[in-house]
């Protein structure tokens, strides 16, 4: 039996705590005297985008002096985990002073590296992005994505031009807006769809209905609209290769080359084409074989796009793709990544194999930049850097070559 007045004492020592779930933990927000007020406030706090959940806890002191608590109300938001589409760091970017430069291979390759996480998530190539109003608008509306990318490029270009980063940033945004508006206007045209008539027929329709200076652009608008609907990288490559074989127009091969070069920027595509290799040194060698059209692809299905691309690279018909792959090979060669990870004793042997693979008696693979990359890679074996380290790297790397013509070719390339 409760003594007279006990209810009042219990009421006075009963509290209602409101907690919010924020950044992965519960935090006490406030304490009120009544359950109704506490529940109403908690529901209101749930509307705050900073809070992922709320709860009300009744806390009271018993007559014997001990405390008790119970959760009266709890509600969590259904919080979707944000995907990481942040901008990647880059060390170089081409100088762009007019919108047309943004479509060029070096600019698209930079876009591929900058927006890699976003493009992988959306399964988009830079070409599709530049030729589709809705997709480009979506990037511009993604929080901080476009701004961060432009800031990085503007900073690099400012060093090249002597202008301020702000001037370069404003110019880049102006060019991007012009690209956006051009894509919007082109999207309103009534050319047939690739899906319905095929790419060769689209080219004929574009030739009949667009001014000469806009024909390549309009054709790429149509192809990009078609490829956006294909939600895997291999499917995009296979489709553009198939479309490019359906007619004799040389522009078909150029368009296929453009798309394939872009798709190779995706995180896993190139490795899927080359196949798993024992180490980075072997991977770079196989990449060079692929560019020369000599990659061994036995055991693959005849429909595997790697076979078609390998053949086209070997005949020199895919210059954009070859340029992209060359850049990738040189970046691997210049990187700090070991040529033979977990095989320290093989590191030097892997370097010598690359040296022999790239330096021939009459030419060096991909020219002087490869010679420089090889010298930089050898410097990793040396204790010293600077001018003396570079001098020793050049001297010893040349001495490692088997023949005098190779040594001369290497030194002349560096000179």
Image (cartoon, rainbow, N blue to C red):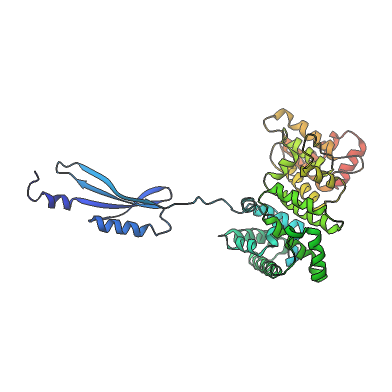
Q: Which residue sits at x=77%, y=60%?
A: 197
Q: Which residue sits at x=59%, y=58%?
A: 145
Q: Nearer the viewer, residue 110 or 122?
A: 122
**Percent x, y of residue 68:** 23, 43
**Percent x, y of residue 29:** 33, 54
Q: Which residue sits at x=26%, y=59%?
A: 37
Residue furthest out toward the left = 4
Q: Quadrant of residue 51?
A: bottom left
Q: Quadrant of the N terminus?
A: top left
Residue furthest out toward the front = 196
Q: Nearer the viewer, residue 237 or 365?
A: 237
Q: Nearer the viewer, residue 84 or 129?
A: 129
**Percent x, y of residue 115:** 64, 54
Question: Against 283, is 172 above or below?
Answer: below
144 horizontally vs 293: left or right:
left
Badge count: 0
**Percent x, y of residue 258:** 77, 55
Q: Quadrant of residue 208?
A: bottom right
Q: Is residue 406 visible?
A: yes
Q: Which residue sits at x=84%, y=42%?
A: 293
């Amino acid at each position: 039996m409760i003594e007279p007045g006990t209810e009042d004492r219990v009421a006075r020592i009963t509290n209602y705590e409101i907690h919010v779930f924020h950044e992965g933990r519960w935090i006490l927000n406030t304490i009120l005297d009544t359950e109704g007020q506490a529940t109403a406030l908690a529901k209101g706090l749930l509307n705050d985008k900073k809070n992922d959940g709320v709860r009300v806890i009744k806390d009271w002191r018993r007559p014997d002096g001990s405390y008790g608590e119970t959760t009266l109300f709890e509600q969590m938001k259904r919080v979707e985990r944000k995907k990481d589409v942040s901008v990647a760091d880059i060390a170089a970017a081409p100088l762009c002073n007019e919108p047309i430069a943004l479509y060029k291979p070096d600019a698209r390759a930079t876009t591929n590296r900058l927006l890699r996480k976003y493009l992988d998530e959306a399964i988009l190539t830079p070409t599709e992005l530049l030729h589709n109003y809705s997709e480009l608008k979506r990037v511009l509306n993604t929080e901080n994505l476009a701004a961060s990318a432009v800031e990085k490029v503007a900073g690099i270009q400012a060093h090249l031009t002597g202008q301020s980063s702000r001037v370069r940033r404003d110019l880049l945004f102006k060019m991007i807006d012009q690209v956006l508006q051009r894509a919007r206007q082109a999207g309103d045209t009534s050319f047939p769809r690739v899906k319905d008539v095929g790419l060769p027929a689209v080219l004929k329709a574009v030739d009949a209905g667009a001014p000469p200076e806009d024909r390549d652009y309009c054709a790429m608008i149509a192809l990009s609209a078609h490829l956006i609907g294909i939600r895997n990288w291999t499917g995009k490559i296979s489709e553009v290769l198939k479309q490019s074989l359906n007619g004799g127009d040389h522009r078909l091969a150029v368009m296929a080359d453009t798309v394939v070069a872009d798709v190779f920027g995706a995180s896993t595509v190139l490795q899927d084409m080359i196949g798993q290799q024992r180490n980075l040194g072997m991977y770079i060698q196989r990449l060079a074989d692929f560019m020369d059209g000599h990659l061994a692809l036995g055991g693959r299905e005849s429909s595997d796009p790697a076979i078609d691309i390998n053949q086209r690279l070997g005949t020199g018909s895919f210059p954009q793709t070859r340029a992209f792959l060359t850049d990738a090979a040189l970046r691997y060669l210049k990187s700090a990544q070991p040529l033979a990870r977990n095989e320290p004793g093989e590191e030097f042997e892997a370097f010598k194999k690359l040296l022999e693979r790239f330096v021939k008696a009459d030419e060096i693979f991909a020219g002087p930049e490869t010679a420089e990359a090889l010298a930089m890679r050898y410097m990793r074996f040396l204790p010293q850097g600077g001018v003396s380290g570079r001098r020793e790297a050049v001297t010893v790397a040349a001495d490692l070559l088997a023949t005098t013509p190779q040594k001369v070719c290497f030194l002349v390339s560096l000179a």
